[in-house]
Amino acid sequence: MRLILKRRGHWGVLLFVLILWGNPAFATDRLVILHSSEHHGVALPLDQAGETEVGGLARRATIVEELRREGVPVLMVDSGDILIGTALSSWFRGEPDIRAMNLIRYDAMVAGNHDFDYGIDHLRTLVELADFPILCTNLRSKRFVLPCRRSVVTRLGNVSVGIVGIVGNSNFPDTFNRDVAKTLSLMDPIASLQMEALRLRAEAQVDLVIALTHQDSNEDLKILETVEGVDVLIGGHTEGFDGLYAPGLMEPVVSVTRPRSVYVKTHRQGRTVGRLDLTIEEGSVTQARSRNIPVTVAVPVDPKVQQLLSEYRQRFARHATQVLGEASVRLQGDRPVVRTQEANLGNLLADRMRRKFDTDIALVNAGQIRRSLEPGPVTLGDVLSVLPFDSALVTLHVTGAMLRQILEHSVSQWPNHSGRFLQISGLQVTYQGKAPVGSRVRSIMVGGAPFDISKTYTVATDAFVADGGDGYDMLTHATDRTDHQIPLRDLLLNALAEGLLYAEADHRMVFVDGKDEN
């Protein structure tokens, strides 16, 4: 270059400037990464107590398109769990959600645990329907080729971006469809991420590596502190937060300068769209800024997405609006309640299960209850929203020692919201919630009689839990198992057909040193 300058004078200087201007390694680039989390079938706006007309894919589409018009390159990604959570999603099994995401022009998503709920073949159907790649970097199968990809490379302006999708140890196999989990193996998330990031930089020569993760936040934070070569972590699976984390930070902040890497996670079910602004100079992130954009009724709907969803809603309405019965009280199934304390809806379902199969005990994992039932008429759509899963009910025999293990596991993450938390019937349990994990069960009564650790009890639950889901591995050693081939939802349908729904919290579950059911 110096020889060119000497021989060509000011023309050489001009040539040097043009080379620098056109070389991405010396340019300053701005990128916007938009991200959604824990969609769970909320294609239409949420309409529940305290949250009216919040979210919805048609309004999300408007926000994304407005940001694209700013002229800065935009990447649109999702952190998994498109399926399960609403009646529309249960009926159409994610088809309208994926088609709407195509219209929004998503660039990638990671396959979350619930995206396997209808089996590998259905995931394959969704992959074929999607105009964007669905990623599962650290999942493997010896039986077949997985339909999801290990990574994808795309380009945003001058910047080449590699995207990977990671499922965490906290998810697999505990929260996966039990039949699917038997066909898969999970590679170490950290090792897999590190290896794929290095491969993308060496072979694809990417400038930026983004990891979409579906795991607990503590697993994300460990990756943030330990993994080299990953510039951005976009989390899912658990509750979101405002701002961003960078290595060494104990709390999220709005922006950071020259971070080694950053970690963001927007709020669940489309309540917000996460926006991460990056400034990149000489191949490194020099500035990162994060905020969550609320998706409210003030945001106009995108007409194309709205038309698509309206067509699906009309098709579903012919079935979903059928009134099946009536509830006389609010049957509490809200996530913060049903996953931390006794709930009257949990009592209703567990009691129906115990009576149906004439067992000593019934156990309902709170993760399968997805919303409340309001007083008044109850439709098929309401039932599908409350209980969207198809997991069959089972009965089995457990020892007293195993029962104590089960109840300890139920509160092992309390007071955090956890799908493993059990709603119960046939039991009166006192928990000491602040005691060390594994020693929180203070007292147990079974059918009004003192608990006997040497006795064998009959238990009704669902196949997901009985197969070790949500970490209930001890139940895989239970005896005399019978599969009844009906889901819990059928018992709720039967209850509606029989008459007015009513249930109350009756102190079958008490926490002596924290919140109780009152």
Image (cartoon, grey):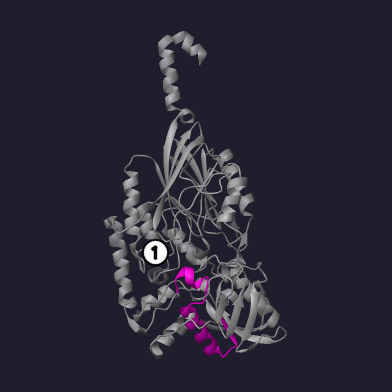
The foreground one among 2 and 411 is 411
The foreground one among 251 and 197 is 251
The foreground one among 127 and 268 is 268
At which x and y percent is residue 150?
A: 55, 52
* Above or below: residue 504 compared with residue 107: below
Is residue 482 at least partly visible in the picture? no
* Above or below: residue 272 compared with residue 173: above
At which x and y percent is residue 13?
A: 43, 15
* Above or below: residue 465 compared with residue 274: below
- At 58% from the left and 58% from the top, the residue drawn is 168
> Which residues fall within the magenta stretch?
333-362
At which x and y percent is residue 298?
A: 28, 56
Q: Main secondary structure of the magenta part?
A: helix
Badge 1: residue crowd in 10 Å (few <14, some 14–19, many ≥20): many
Is residue 234 at least partly visible in the picture? yes
**Seen from this angle, which residue lies furthest right?**
454
Magenta span contains residue 280 = no
- At 44% from the left and 57% from the top, the residue drawn is 267
Q: Quadrant of residue 319?
A: bottom left
* Above or below: residue 432 compared with residue 203: below
In the structure shown, which secondary structural element does the residue marked by tag 1 occupy? loop
Name the residue that disc number 1 marks: 42
At which x and y percent is residue 464?
A: 56, 74
- At 71% from the left and 83% from the top, the residue drawn is 453
| Residue type highlighted by circle 1 | Val
**Seen from this angle, which residue lies furthest front?**
513
Please indicate whether residue 261 sits to the left or right of residue 325 in the image.
Answer: right
Instruction: Report the number of numbered marks.
Output: 1
Magenta span contains residue 358 = yes
